[in-house]
């Protein structure tokens, strides 16, 4: 069957999907329906942290299947979601968890929590940042500081303004008595793999403390071991009031979390927010597999591999100064800023058996499975070097 043609005939036109249909996968390799094998540096866009055909994940799926249900709704408890919430609070220092299905949904919950928190004192304004990305639903896209995502969908949700990322003075310039929260990605993902400067992110924390604001960290892409720490904010020695997570948390199944820390504890009451599928048994059961790996030291390995990968990219940049301008990121969330079109590099890498993706307008993004080994990194670097030599 021609699955690609079938998709093009029946899907809404919302994605610029490559003509590659996945047949099966194992480890850090994807195999398409034409029999081609690819080294995967995309990982479902930072989702498949533990790689493919993982035995622990398969065993847990079988365990839940044997219970005979995946879903009972939030009218009742299931035995997996409370364990997942407890483990997540333990890992992060959070106090309360709301489970949903996607990063956008997690950020919608965070936005509603911020507005309710501010409503006690008549405040509703939220400060976000240029080049940010928080999702595609209306609240999430309104929080996203990139005009290209807003075109055709105005008006946006009101009282959301955008400061300049890594510029504390631009935040102070937007401060007034109506601000209730500030939201940011500790490492911007879709905006181009841009880490926060330590002074900037600590300064934001102080502004929030001094003005009784909620600090929201969107760790959807940069959380759960991706940067070499359990959560990206740990690089800076501070904590948020709310954190949003998704991507890796469900080991490939839809799951997201909005985590409330002490200042945001108790904002929601029954009826304020909900998600029919949020916290379903299967997704939350799989999250426990990831939490086990994080607690067993996965992040230490990610930090080592990330440094090795980044050093390799820096050597490539030095060898191709006419085609590369910067290397940045943390852990295994890395970006190579290009002077040539990323789409050209992506296409040629794919021809050579390497899957990569882009971020922003000029950045080649690397978010491989966290279980990747050094040999795989060497292979990826070799292909990238070869492709840049050919362009």
Image: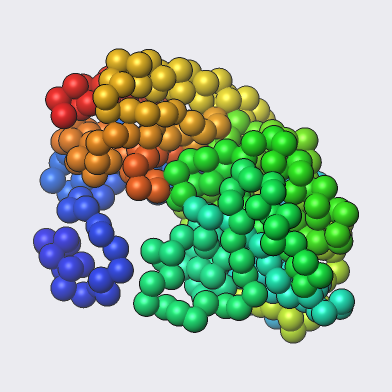
Q: Is residue 274 above or below residue 17?
A: below
Tell me, yes or no, if residue 63 can be seen here: no
**Is residue 7 rendered to the left or right of residue 209?**
left
Q: Residue at x 88, y 54 (%)?
A: 210
Q: Position of residue 267 (x, y in %)?
A: 82, 71
In the image, taking residue 320 as reference, residue 99 lies left or right, namely right
Instruction: Give the quarter of the image for residue 347.
Output: top left
Residue plotted at (35% across, 21% down): 317
Q: Tell me the quadrant of the picture where the C terminus can be found.
A: top left
Q: How many marks?
A: 0
* Residue projecting furthest to the bottom: 271
Q: Quadrant of residue 69?
A: bottom right
Foreground residue, 270 or 219?
Answer: 219
The N terminus: image quadrant: bottom left
Q: Looking at the image, can residue 172 be seen?
A: yes
Q: Name above or below for residue 299 compared with residue 43.
A: above
Position of 154 relative to 46 (above/below) = below
- Quarter of the image for residue 228 reads top right
Instruction: From the viewer's perspective, tell me whether residue 199 is left or right of residue 226.
Output: right
Task: Name the residue at 51% across, 25% down.
Answer: 306
Colour scheme: rainbow
Q: Which residue appears at 61% of the width and 56% of the height?
A: 163
Q: Give the camera-side residue of 280 and 66.
A: 280
- Pick the front one: 183 or 245: 183
**215 shown above or below 372:** below
Where residue 60 appears, as percent x and y from the top left, is 55, 49
Indicate the position of residue 389 as horizontal and vertical percent values. Answer: 19, 22
Locate residue 56, reporting x and y percent.
53, 41
């Amino acid at each position: 069957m021609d699955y690609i043609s079938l998709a093009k005939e029946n899907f809404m036109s919302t994605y610029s999907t490559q003509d590659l249909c996945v047949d099966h996968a194992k480890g850090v390799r994807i195999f398409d329906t034409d029999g081609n094998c690819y080294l995967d540096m995309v990982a479902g866009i930072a989702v498949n942290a533990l790689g493919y055909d993982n035995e622990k994940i398969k065993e847990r799926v079988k365990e839940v299947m044997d219970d005979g249900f995946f879903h009972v709704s939030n009218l009742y408890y299931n035995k997996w979601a409370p364990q997942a919430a407890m483990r997540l609070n333990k890992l992060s220092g959070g106090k309360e968890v709301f489970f949903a299905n996607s990063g956008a949904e997690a950020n919608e919950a965070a936005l509603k929590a911020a507005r309710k928190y501010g409503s006690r004192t008549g405040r509703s304004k939220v400060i976000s940042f240029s080049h940010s990305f928080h999702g595609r639903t209306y609240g999430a896209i309104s929080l996203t500081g990139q005009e290209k995502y807003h075109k055709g969908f105005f008006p946006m949700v009101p009282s959301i303004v955008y400061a300049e990322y890594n510029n504390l003075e631009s935040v102070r310039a937007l401060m007034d008595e109506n601000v209730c929260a500030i939201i940011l990605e500790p490492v911007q993902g879709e905006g181009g793999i841009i880490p926060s400067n330590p002074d900037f992110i600590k300064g934001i924390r102080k502004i929030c403390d001094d003005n009784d604001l909620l600090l929201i960290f969107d760790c959807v892409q940069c959380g759960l071991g991706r940067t070499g720490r359990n959560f990206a904010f740990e690089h800076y020695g501070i904590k948020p009031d709310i954190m949003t997570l998704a991507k890796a948390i469900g080991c490939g199944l839809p799951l997201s979390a909005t985590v409330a820390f002490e200042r945001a504890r108790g904002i929601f009451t029954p009826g304020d927010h909900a998600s029919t599928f949020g916290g379903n048994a299967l997704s939350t059961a799989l999250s426990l597999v990831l939490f086990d790996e994080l607690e067993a030291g996965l992040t230490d390995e990610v930090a080592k591999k990330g440094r090795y990968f980044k050093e390799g990219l820096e050597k490539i940049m030095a060898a191709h100064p006419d085609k590369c301008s910067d290397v940045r990121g943390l852990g295994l969330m890395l970006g190579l800023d290009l002077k040539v079109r990323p789409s050209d590099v992506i296409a040629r890498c794919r021809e050579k058996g390497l899957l990569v993706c882009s971020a922003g307008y000029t950045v080649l993004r690397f978010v491989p499975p966290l279980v990747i080994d050094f040999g795989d990194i060497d292979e990826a670097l070799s292909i990238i070097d070869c492709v840049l030599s050919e362009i």
